[in-house]
Amino acid sequence: MLEIHQFPCLSDNYGYLVHDTASGETTCIDTPDAAEYLKQAEAKGWKITQIWNTHWHPDHAGGNEAIKAATGCAISGPAEVTKIAPLDRELTADDTVALGDHVAKVIDVSGHTNGHIAFFMPDDGVAFVGDSVFALGCGRMFEGEPQQFWGSLSRIKTLPPETMLYCAHEYTASNAKFASHADPDNAALAAYVAEIAAKRANDEPTVPAQLGRELATNPFLRADDPAMQQRWGGATPAETFAALRSAKDNF
Ligand SMILES: [Zn+2]
């Protein structure tokens, strides 16, 4: 059985420890805060054996060195991680990594950074998407181009709709404000926004998010919808995505 332990760390990151009960293996999904990861693993009684990095940013790979020093774990991630942190295995699209019998497929979700990857575990129905897509939002386009980022979101869109997306930050309340501005006549979005407000009022996480619901409500995943193209302009989905991303940056 696969167990996912989610916990807040740094100011608004989510940490994830993923544990396979059969093999006893445990992987860190990114390493925003080494001390917190080690503490959480100890509390669960889990020994960290791996790290899977999504991208090179310090709030994702900054704890690699300390966690490896403490546990001797093996680190897998995109080559860009070596800019700031150690890596044992470089991953590219369509590679796989495994936690016991649980396989994760590497998906290219670049755009936030040029090497950003996601880990999709088809048999478990979960995807760890880092800063590529968020509940009702997507990552800032620090390194990539609109066509590239839209290609990444298009790959996420093709995953089974019941897939649970584990993104790396609790940005949902802020994203919901922009989504409501971007797509004001969307009833499914309005219902989702109300649920999010209630959860945040109780200090509950809004992550993970179900892909199917995001497909109906997340403006960035809907840049190929004719209604969104009409409202936001753009002759192609990538151009509509670019208009939305730019508007959000200045919202
Ligand atoms: Zn990032």
Image (spheres, grey):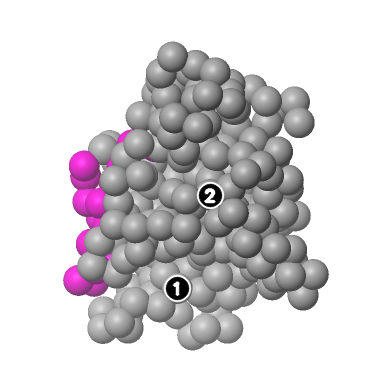
- Count of marks, rendered view: 2
Question: On the image, which quarter does residue 248 sit in?
Answer: top right
Circles 1 and 2, Cβ within 8 Å, touching? The answer is no
Q: What stretch is highlighted in magenta?
A: 94-114
The answer to whether residue 138 is visible is: no
- Dot 1 surroundings within 10 Å: few (below 14), some, or many (20 or more)? some
User: Does any atom of ligand 1 lie closer than 8 Å to the CB of label 2?
Assistant: no
- Seen from this angle, which residue lies furthest right? 201
State yes or no: residue 211 in magenta: no
Residue 199: x and y in percent read: 70, 70
Residue 154: x and y in percent read: 35, 36
Which amino acid does the dot numbered 1 rest on? Answer: Ile
The answer to whether residue 190 is visible is: yes
Residue at 67% x, 25% y: name it. 247
Question: On the image, which quarter does residue 20 sit in?
Answer: bottom left
Q: Is mark 1 on a helix, strand or loop?
A: strand
Of labels 1 and 2, earlier in sequence is 1
Residue 114: x and y in percent read: 44, 26
Q: How far apart are marks 1 and 2 (CA)?
A: 25 Å
- Dot 2 surroundings within 10 Å: few (below 14), some, or many (20 or more)? many
Q: Is residue 185 above or below residue 11?
A: above
- Seen from this angle, which residue lies furthest top? 235
State yes or no: residue 98 in magenta: yes
Camera-side residue of 223 and 210: 223
> Can you identify the residue that label 1 sits on?
4
Q: Is residue 142 above or below residue 131?
A: above
Camera-side residue of 209 and 94: 209
Residue at 27% x, 37% y: name it. 92
Which amino acid does the dot numbered 2 rest on? Answer: Thr
Dot in front, 1 or 2 = 2
Residue 75: x and y in percent read: 38, 52
> Can you identify the residue that label 2 sits on?
217
